Amino acid sequence: MTSPGRATRVGHFPDLEGSYLDTATQGVGPRAAAVATAHATQKWARGVADHTRWEERGEEARARVAELLDVHAADVALVPSQVAAATIVAQALREATVVVPEQEYRANLLPWTQSRPRSRARIVAAPATTDRLLDAIDDGVDLVAVSSVQSADGLRVDLPRVVDHAHRHGALVYVDASQSFGVDADLAGSGADVIAAVGYKWLLGPRGVCYLMVRSGLREKVAPLLASPESAADARHYGSDYRPWPDARRFDQPLAWPALVGATAGLDLLSGFPTSVLDTHSVELGRRMRDGLATAGIAVAPEDQPSPIIAVPDRAPARTVAGLAAMGVRAAARAHLVRFSFHLFNDSTDVDAALHALTSVRQRSLEQK
């Protein structure tokens, strides 16, 4: 097995340019995924594509994700987005009192806050650390909706602790794992009732697929929000009789076929690494970045648990990100922050490049004032 870092980049991401530290916005497709997707597109253009083969890739992706979460394949649904995943559960539990962080990315915020009275949505002010979440959870709470790693600033909570506390108070836990699935060793064993993650970030696939894991006992109580041919157990395309799957597949929705091809190829690569190895690798790069920023006297967003995402407060983040890009470093501008994220194709040279570029951009900014 190739170790994550430079060797993985050379072997699987040969076209990657500069220091790409923006997986939290969009992951990079490995060469195998790019080739497979291009081949599928060519078949489509020639009129010789077989959509059933693409759907088989979807079943392979479902199985890969189930392995990463240590569940059965039938525990995982294929849906198009995080919004769809959260809305399925939010609409089924419209009377529930929900705890949700204020700084959640809106894909995991609006489905909970817009479908219920304000009195049933407890908003946790930023930063929504583990302790703040625990303080908000009592016997009056029915569900906690939280990202394992926050999109804006990379704040990573102690997920097993949050789940244990919520369950002791009789509350379910919905986890948006879009910013951690693939590099989060705590996720599979966290005990969360629902885990959803888009496939186009840390899972190295194209946009168009989201994976929704719903544990047995809850999914049987949730009717499909959008009844579809994919959610029906009889596999018929015509007729009004409808019998949904008895498992998580009852939430399946139609997906973009070519996206399933790239998704499977990305998961194949990711599955070749133990999640614990990728967790350690990405978190260690984040720690190196945090230490380097401290040495340079640059403030960093607060930390709870060690995270693969590091954010730096910045008065003009878009301008800073543009300056970084000019020096070959790809980062993201988010809510008065510059965000850096580290994955399996990154190594210490990317951290050093980011530190050098950031200090240079900031120095030029000071000189221009």
Image (spheres, rainbow, N blue to C red):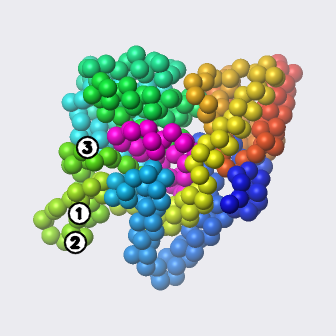
Front-lying residue, 15 or 285: 285
Which residue in the rendered view is the most extreme toward the right? Answer: 367
| Picture quadrant of residue 238 | bottom left
Magenta region, mostly helix, strand or loop?
A: loop
Tell me where residue 248 appears, x and y as whole percent.
30, 54
Tell me where residue 268 appears, x and y as whole percent.
56, 63
Say what amino acid the circle numbered 1 marks: Ala
Tell me where residue 294 appears, x and y as whole percent.
76, 22
Label 2, on which residue?
236
Mark in the foreground, 1 or 3: 3
- Counting every numbered tag in the picture gives 3
Tell me the CA gap for discs 1 and 2: 8 Å
User: Is residue 221 shown left or right of residue 57?
Assistant: left
Label 1, on which residue?
232
Say what amino acid the circle numbered 2 marks: Arg
Which residues fall within the magenta stretch?
181-209
